[in-house]
Amino acid sequence: MTAASPDPAVWLKAQRSQNSNGCIEQCRPDTQVSVRDTKQHGQGPTLRMSRSAYATWIASAKDGELDHLAGL
């Protein structure tokens, strides 16, 4: 008997937004990262990018470089 490997298609939501639907989820099944809107309940579009592009995107958001997209 072997232990079951983790499901590679597990979608994760940020811990800080567990009680909110206003966030995104991510999935890392391979060398790419998939991102989707939590409110779509898996029925909406999915954005796929390389892990390095995802890291750049997250760093840009943290640095405020994308605030203009949210009208901030």
Image: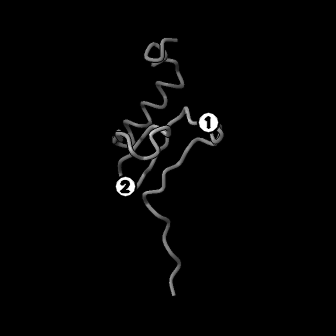
Give above or below for 3 relative to 54: below
Q: Is residue 31 left or right of residue 65?
A: left
Residue 42, percent from left and from top: 42, 47
Q: Which of 14 and 52 lies nearest the eye of the viewer? A: 14
- Which of the numbered marks, if any, corresponds to residue 7? none
Mark 2 or 1: in front is 1
Residue under label 1: 20
Q: Is residue 58 left or right of residue 47?
A: right
Q: Position of residue 61 (x, y in %)?
A: 49, 25
Label 1 neighbour load within 10 Å: few <14, some 14-19, many 20+: few
Q: Label 1 is placed on what type of residue?
A: Ser
**In the structure shown, which secondary structural element does the residue marked by tag 2 occupy?**
loop
- As shown in the figure, which amino acid type bears the numbered disc 2? Asp
Q: Nearer the viewer, residue 17 or 50?
A: 17
Q: Quadrant of residue 35?
A: top left
Residue 30 is labelled as 2
Above or below — where is 41 with respect to 67? below
Residue at horizontal 52 percent and vertical 21 percent from the top = 63
Closer to the chain start, of discs 2 and 1, is 1
| Residue, far bottom | 1
Q: Residue at x 49, y 16 (%)?
A: 67
Q: Nearer the viewer, residue 20 or 50?
A: 20
Which percent across, then down, holds residue 50?
A: 34, 42
Which residue does the image show at 37% across and 55% down from the upper left? 30
